[in-house]
Image (cartoon, coloured by chain):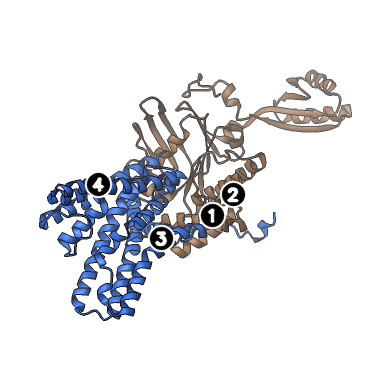
Amino acid sequence: MTSAIHDIGYRHYDGPRLGRGYVRRSLYLHNLRAAWGLGRPARSKVLPFLLAAIVLLPALGSVAIAVATKMPGELIRYSAYAIYLQVVVAIFLATQAPVLASRDLRFHVVPLYFSRPVGHLDFVLAKLGAMATALFVLLAAPVITLYIGSLIAKTPDRGTQALEAAGALVGCAVFALVLASLGLVIAAFTARRGLGVAAVIAFYMISTAFVSMLQGIAEARTNFTLVGWLGLLSPFNLVDIVQVRLLGAELTALGAPSGIGGGLAALAICVAIVALAIPILGRRYRKAGLS
Amino acid sequence: MPIIAAEGLTMRFPRVTALDDLTFAVEPGVVGLVGANGAGKSTLIKILLGLLPPSAGRAEVLGLDIARQGAEIRALVGFMPEYECLPPDVSATEFVVHMARMSGLPATAARERAADVLRHVGLYEERYRPIGGYSTGMRQRVKLAQALVHDPRLVFLDEPTNGLDPAGRDEMLALIRRIGAEFGISVLVTSHLLGELERVCDHVVIIDGGRLLRSQAVASFTEASGTLVVEVEEGRDVLGERLHAAGAAVRPDGRVLAVEIAGEQTYDLIRDTVVDLDLRLVRLEQRRHRIEEVFTAPVPPPAPPQGAMR
């Protein structure tokens, strides 16, 4: 055997073995890279980067127009951006959530993690954190672009601009956490990637279409209170309620329940979605780790 | 100190008893865990990894209690599952490096160890290509590499020869022997084929239907039996008669003669008789028991005799 010539024999490893924090951080980075197709063949990168480009394009166009026409008022509102582009954001979630949630399940990789010093909770938090970060980058990039545009276009009232942009970034974080939780839970229960994509899209379409239909009926009957409360049932409208009632943004979605109370109700639902997703995913992977 | 010690280990599932009052202890080395499919081998590994709490009984791995110190056990052992467990879209290098980091190895060390271990299991240039295009043999090597990359003190190898052709099987068995002998890592390897484990193991644990059939050093299975095998080119019968006349206990056994060893003089008698008759001696050796005889020979207690393997 030719290899024997180079064989210098087995060497034991006596270097450091880092703890739980390092493992969790490595797992988070691994998943974050996977969400963008990094470290994978080129075709895995096409979709996330193409969708990110589509999400960023209107912001760039808006900045170009505002700078060229010297009309900074023409810039798209920060807090409205995610809702205007919600279809593209939903497609990003639908295509990338299965990469994180169901790939390890489908190829039975999960037991290899749990036969190492990796905890169930850390495993889930790393995936959820990575998916949320990927979404946050997707949503925050155009908001930051618009803010830079407003500086270039010399928008008056810089203080308000900065405040609105900061509020929108907090909104982006809420969007990212809620959407990541929903997307991962749905994808984790559909083992095949194609089905996972379809399931997430279906969930988005049905919840959004159904809620806006009900809101339309309520509006026709001039029951605006109901329009607002129904908004809690569709993910994008839900987070917009948080933005409008708690972060001082203008309303973009169809309706929002009035007052701080409405905002707190929406925030409570957001927190509940994230808080429920963690044990549901934990149980799913624990079971898969023993199969 | 035994690497694995089990005491009354029992695992009951709603419809089946996977392990039934298993008590055994094994010393460092290469240990074979033999049983038919469904005998409870994989369940036993999951319990020993501390992933599945047993219904009753207790066990220690490397002196650590499976119920309380599961995380510590999992830091010190490696696990190669029976089934496919590799993502197709990453390279072997990328995957094994990642798994090293999951065991706490810093990034640089993880890369070095992954390169080392992939070379040891016999993966060279192909390690940079996505795993999806690998043959079964190469996949088994990647699975083995990820189990070894963090330099464990003990590896659990579940059916590592499954799906391999005879040449691949021999290479895998040789690799397992090297892990135990050269790498100094204890091995618990499962198989439903007793014969192949006989070649690489120091100790065999045999379970059937979740019950312990035997736990014994391989040397004691195959120790000298007190019979000499004599093979000559021609004249087997003449030799047999002469030896019988000289008072040796001899009987024909196929093409050879089996002679009971009465003492040193038996060897001399055979040598002298062969020379006297001017025969060509092909073979003169001590017969060893084969491990398979475990299943045909009556078994001493405590193992129950009725549990013959299929």
Mark 2 or 1: the one toward you: 2
Q: Are marks 2 and 3 on the same chain?
A: no
Q: Is residue A131 above or below residue B18?
A: below
Q: Chain of mark 4?
A: A
User: Which secondary structure lies at badge 1?
Assistant: helix
- Mark 2 is on which residue type? Tyr
Mark 4 on the same chain as mark 1? no
The Cα atoms of the two marked residues, 3 and 4, are separated by: 27 Å
- State the mark number for residue B276: none
> Which residue does the image show at 19% across and 58% down from the upper left?
A242
The residue lying at 12 percent from left, 50 percent from top is A225
How far apart in space, not on screen, are marks 3 and 1 (Cα)? 29 Å
* Residue annotated with mark 3: A51
Foreground label between 3 and 4: 4
- In this picture, is A107 found above or below B129? above
Q: Nearer the viewer, mark 2 or mark 3?
A: 3
Q: Say which of B215 and A282 sits in front.
A: A282
Sequence-first disc among 3 and 4 = 3
Labels 3 and 1 touching (C-beta < 8 A): no
**Percent of width and height locating residue A209:** 29, 47
Q: Quadrant of the C terminus of chain B?
A: top right
Front: mark 4 or 1: 4
At 55% from the left edge and 59% from the top edge, which residue is drawn? B116
Q: Which chain is blue?
A: A
Calculate the distance from the C-alpha at mark 2 to the C-alpha at mark 1.
10 Å
Q: Is residue B283 visible?
A: yes
Q: Is label 2 in contact with label 1 (beta carbons under 8 Å)?
A: yes
Outermost residue on the front side: it is: A220
Q: CA distance from mark 4 to mark 1?
A: 50 Å
